[in-house]
Image (spheres, rainbow, N blue to C red):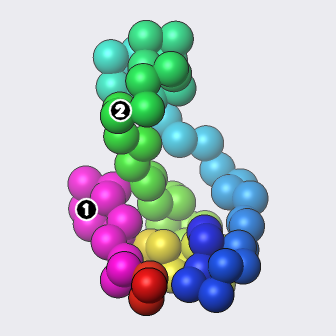
């Protein structure tokens, strides 16, 4: 995640994103080169959520049930 001060935080997710088929998979060959195809956030399984790092907890708290992360715009 890029922050308003220009720094970035990175967290490795320790669970896979699962898709029912290639049509909905943003990483499938069909969508991989389409910059407008959304990559939505999938929350970790319930048993892993409490142990996720703070950055992942922040994303979970600011994501919709559909997986869109809603953050305030960075100041200009």
Q: Which of the 4 image quarters holds residue 19?
A: top left
Task: Answer with mark 1 or mark 2, whichever residue precedes in sequence.
Answer: 2
Residue 34's place in the image compared with 37, above or below, is above
Q: Which residue is at a point 56% across and 84% down the rendered structure image?
A: 4
- Name the spot of residue 46 as percent of width and height, x first: 48, 66
- Most common secondary structure along the magenta stretch: loop
Mark 1: give few (<14), some (14-19) or many (20+) Cα within 10 Å: few
Residue closest to the eye, 56 or 37: 37
Per the image, the residue denoted by label 2 is 37
Q: Is residue 51 visible?
A: no
Relative side of 32 to 75, left or right: right
Most extreme residue toward the top is 30
Q: Please state which of the two labelled residues, at mark 1 or mark 2, is closer to the viewer.
A: 2
Q: Which mark is residue 32?
A: none
- Name the spot of residue 38 as percent of width and height, x first: 36, 40
Instruction: Report the quarter where the C terminus lies.
Output: bottom left
Q: Which of the 4 image quarters holds residue 37?
A: top left
Per the image, the residue denoted by label 1 is 65
Estimate the spatial distance between the alpha carbons at disc 1 and disc 2, rounded to whole Å: 18 Å
Relative side of 51 to 20, left or right: right
Instruction: Report the quarter where the N terminus lies.
Output: bottom right
- Over which residues does the magenta segment extend? 63-73
Q: Which of the 4 image quarters holds residue 50?
A: bottom right
- Say whether marks 1 and 2 touch (CB < 8 Å): no
Residue 66 colored in magenta in the image? yes
Residue 72 colored in magenta in the image? yes
């Amino acid at each position: 995640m890029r922050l308003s001060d220009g720094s970035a935080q990175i967290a490795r997710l320790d669970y896979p994103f699962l898709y029912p088929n290639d049509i909905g998979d943003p990483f499938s060959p069909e969508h991989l080169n389409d910059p407008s195809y959304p990559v939505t956030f999938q929350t970790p399984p319930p048993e892993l959520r409490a142990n996720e790092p703070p950055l992942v907890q922040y994303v979970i708290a600011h994501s919709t049930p559909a997986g869109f992360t809603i953050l305030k715009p960075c100041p200009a």
